[in-house]
Image (cartoon, rainbow, N blue to C red):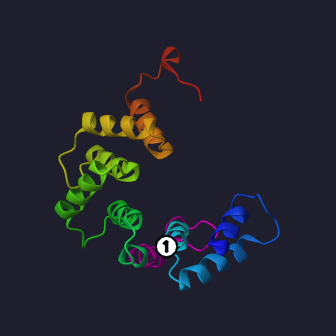
Amino acid sequence: DAMYIWAALTAYNFDYTFTKKQAVKFLEKAADKKHIPSLIELGLLYSKGTGVELNKKKAAYYFNLAASLGSVEAEIRLLMFRILNNDKTLDLKREISLLKKYNKAGSVLAETVLAYCYQYGKGVKKNDAEAVRLYKKASMRGSQTAYNSLKRMYDDIRPDDKLFKIYD
């Protein structure tokens, strides 16, 4: 836990005792001990190339490992990662069923990913109204990702007239 927390303090610039590279090393050491939050964090870093070289295989490895240790969050992140990266081995019917199950159980992340699926027709029939409904619900529950996705959807249909501009 301490290595994970110290890595987070470094990543968010609350502490400058260690470099960001050293913070990643802390996460890797914690991950070697099967620390689930560290595994998920490494998956996120490698999936985006944040502080490390982009490596989708490593990202999937860390998400898979955390999911195999019983982390529902890691399982949802793995589903999201696979859907966003158009994984050819996906069983979209199964994945959508899992997302719906986790959404029903209260996962904001599952709700956001499910909205994405409806927005782009991934494993479900494209349905902008359902995507908006899910994004709204997830953003009201605190998901910045859902809020940004919803805003982009509205921006795409909003007239380009100055009268309709929304300023951040």
Does residue 71 lie above or below 111 as drawn? Answer: below
Q: Does the magenta stretch include residue 139?
A: no
- 62 sits to left or right of 123: right
- The boundaries of the magenta stretch are 46-64
Give the quadrant of the C terminus: top right
- 23 sits to left or right of 165: right
**Nearer the observer, 62 or 108:** 108
Q: Is residue 55 magenta?
A: yes
**Nearer the observer, 2 or 28:** 2
**Nearer the observer, 29 or 165:** 29
Residue type at numbered disc 1 = Ile
Residue 144, position in %: x, y?
50, 43
Q: Residue at x 20, y 57 (%)?
A: 97
- 143 sits to left or right of 14: left
Q: Mark 1 points at which residue?
A: 36
Does residue 17 lie above or below 151 as drawn? Answer: below
Does residue 42 lie above or below 137 as drawn? Answer: below
